[in-house]
Image (cartoon, rainbow, N blue to C red):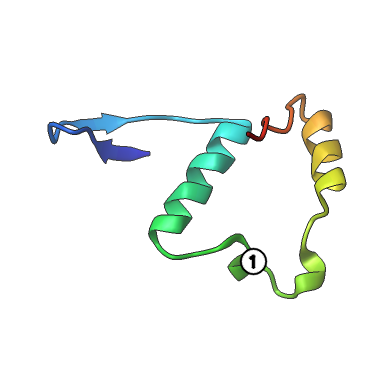
Amino acid sequence: VEAQDREGRRIKERGEGLLARAMQHELDHLKRILYIDYLESMEDLIPVDRMEEELAEAGEEMPAVG
């Protein structure tokens, strides 16, 4: 991701795995794009328990909420 800090200096950040997914999610919000906008049908939604399984297989964890 390329951005600017509060003083207007250019910065670059790189993310992998869950961090990269979170960064893309937030960039999409800035463009007024929601996760469901990428789906062809609402049946393509991934249940949370299945997402947990996929993250576990990739060696990652669901982020804590709250």
Which residue is nearer to you in this view: 54 or 26?
26
Please state the horizontal and vertical placement of residue 63, each as a whole percent of the image: 67, 31
Q: Which quadrant of the rendered structure holds the C terminus? A: top right
User: What is the residue that sits farthest to the top in this orientation?
Assistant: 59
Which residue is nearer to you in this view: 58 or 4?
4
Q: Could you say which quadrant of the image residue 46 lies in?
A: bottom right
Please state the horizontal and vertical placement of residue 41, each as a whole percent of the image: 75, 75
Left or right placement of residue 5 versus residue 56 in this view: left
Q: Could you say which quadrant of the image residue 56 lies in?
A: top right
Residue type pointed to by label 1? Ile
Q: Residue at x 62, y 32 (%)?
A: 17
Mark 1 crowd level (few <14, some 14–19, many ≥20, 10 Å Cα): few
Q: Is residue 57 above or below residue 26?
A: above
User: What is the residue that sits farthest to the bottom in this orientation?
Assistant: 41
Q: Residue at x 56, y 30 (%)?
A: 16
User: What is the residue that sits farthest to the left in this orientation?
Assistant: 7
Q: Secondary structure at mark 1?
A: helix
Please state the horizontal and vertical placement of residue 4, each as a whole percent of the image: 22, 37
Q: Could you say which quadrant of the image residue 9 lies in?
A: top left
Q: Which residue is mark 1?
A: 36
Number of dots carrying numbers: 1
Left or right placement of residue 58 versus residue 27 in this view: right
Q: Is residue 53 above or below residue 30?
A: above
Q: Which quadrant of the rendered structure holds the N terminus? A: top left
